[in-house]
Amino acid sequence: MNPAAPAGTLSENIGAGLLSSVIMLCYALSYAALIFSGDLAAYLHSGVLVTLMCCVVVAPVIALSSSIRFTIGGPDGNSAAILAGMASGIAADLAYTSGQGVLVTLLAALALSSLLSGVLLYLLGATKGSALIQFLPYPVMGGYLAGTGYLLLSGSFRVLTGERLQWSQLRHLLDLPWLAWLPALVVCGVLMAGARRIKRLTLVVPLGIGAGLLVFFAGLTFTGVTPQQARQAGLLFESVPLSALQLPVLLPPEQIHWRVIVAHLPEFFVVAAVSALTILLNATGAGLACRQDPDLDQEMRAAGVANLLSGALGGIVGYQSLSRTLLNHRAGGVSRISGLAAAAGCLIVVLAFPGLIGWMPKSVLVGLQLYLGIGLLQEWLLRSYRRLGRAEYLLIPLIVVVIAVHGVVAGVGLGMVAACMLFVIKYGRISAIRSEFDGRSFSSNVERAMADSAALRQHGGQVIGASLHRFLFFATANAILQRVRARLAEAERPRYVLLDFRRIDGLDASTSVSFLKLRQMCEAAGVTLVRSLSLAALHHMEAEDGDTAQQFHRFVVKVLAARLALANDAVRAAH
């Protein structure tokens, strides 16, 4: 349970929520421009309503059901970057489609991605599976977040130029009017400088947006360009009437290209996985910053319900936002009223003042995207170098390059494979041999004559053994094989090799190949291999009875003692 927090005055919560709604609207427009860019720029008016619907629906659900009472929910840059790539792919697949087929298919795909994310997030929370996300390797998470930063930069380029970010397309930046890029640089620069010098986050984002608006409209006045001319040039958003909203249930099914949607189905699951990971990070970060104890499963369920409603009404994926939650808290929001006020502010703009959207410069929102993208790249491509080992760090730029060339699915998939291989290599270097012994240092408990004991001490080197521990798999088993091979190559070759499995935590089926080679090697060298328990017997015991530790330990002690006595007797008889 979270510690009791002061309720705050009603005016403080409402004021903080309204401030959050302004920032949320700016981000929503920025994500709309990101998703509906390039060949999809003609449908931006529909994209604006899609992201605004997410704000209106997700924010109140998160406010009412989050375990952190002042959480602000809405669209997020991580999922928006994935959706932008998916939208670009759908537009490319339908490049030769006429009519409204492209828009209808894209709206259906966005709604379905929200619905699928909602189902998966709710199931993850309902089954208390939030902890599973924490098994994602840290370098893979860093590589994905750095890749998201690249996608945000790529999306900013596409918003400005209408082209994909490629070396051959960089020349288009030279053709842009200064009103298209200077306000973006001002916003990004003010935000980056303010984040380092101004401790109060409440002031940084409004200050950056205000500076960009000032530069843009001062530029319009200086150049004599009218707002209408700026809209025709694509510098300002178009006013969006609410009548342009298309609910998913009202979309004409005959115009939806289902094969294209199915082809992009893997990206739907990526969006859901990215959403779950971001919720985990955002909820944990907000809890640490605001001294709260979030219930991650409750956060997953809240986001699941929010996305089911958002998808049903045509909105994109949305969930808990870290930056807006911190802004809301530092502005005075401490109760659920602040989140409801943020949702109400968005709803008022959509219903009563949709014309305000037509006065927002695209370049200002591009500045927000630049700030987010550069921040992610700085954090994970530069600063993470000091926190990670060299091999782990190299996974991050590798994943970024693959995401840039082949997409998020390929980048994350390759990162998971590479991280698993790196883990196997590192774990395989840890010796599974707890200790080594021979007949001189480790003998049976049989009482013998002094002469016999002296003979055993003299020739005890012909009996060698190793006590194994930890979990055995093909890499550690192969290390054991190499160690025994080295001992057999010594001048004083042993006649008996004993392996003690008493302290192992378990073993993988792949170890059978290494131990089979070990047995064949011993047979070829005329050496007797003594094992405390056969692998087949161990697997049989594990299958028959899950509690094998105690019976295995008792069995090993008896067998080791008996077989060591036999080995000692054989050595004594030979000499």
Image (cartoon, rainbow, N blue to C red):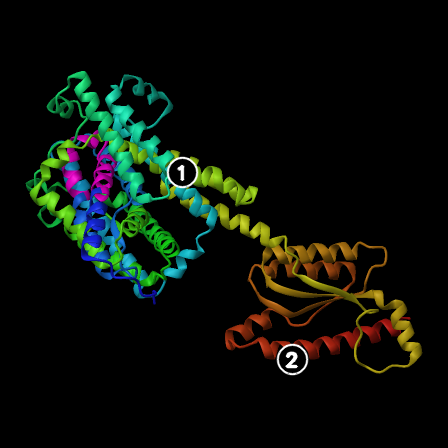
User: Percent position (x, y) of residue 185?
Assistant: 32, 27
Question: Which residue does the numbered mark 2 point to in the structure image?
Answer: 554
User: Which of 392/493 is in front?
Assistant: 392
Image location (x, y in percent) of residue 33: 22, 35
Q: Nearer the viewer, mark 2 or mark 1?
A: 1
Q: Quadrant of residue 195?
A: top left
Tell me the element at label 2: helix
Residue 112 part of the magenta-drawn span: no
- Residue 513 x, y percent position in the rendering: 61, 58
Instruction: Please give the name of the residue rendered at 68% of the width and 72% of the height, measured from the top-left corner.
Output: 532
Asked if the magenta segment contains residue 30, the reply would be yes
Between residues 151 and 184, which one lies in front from this camera angle?
A: 184
Tell me which label, 2 or 1, sits earlier in the chain. Answer: 1
Please say whether residue 485 is visible from this viewpoint.
Answer: yes
Determine the image quadrant of residue 454. Answer: bottom right
Which amino acid type corresponds to the residue marked 2 in the rendered image?
A: Arg
Q: Which residue is mark 1?
A: 196
Q: Are marks 2 and 1 in contact (CB under 8 Å)?
A: no
Q: Is 328 above or below relative to 34?
A: below
Q: Quadrant of the C terminus?
A: bottom right
Task: Tell me what residue is drawn at x 17 percent, y 39 percent.
Answer: 48
- Where disc 1 sits, the SS reads helix
User: Amino acid under label 1?
Assistant: Arg
**The magenta stretch spans which residues?**
23-51
Question: Mostly what secondary structure, the magenta segment?
Answer: helix
Q: Nearer the viewer, residue 192 or 458?
A: 192
State whether residue 100 is above or below residue 135: above
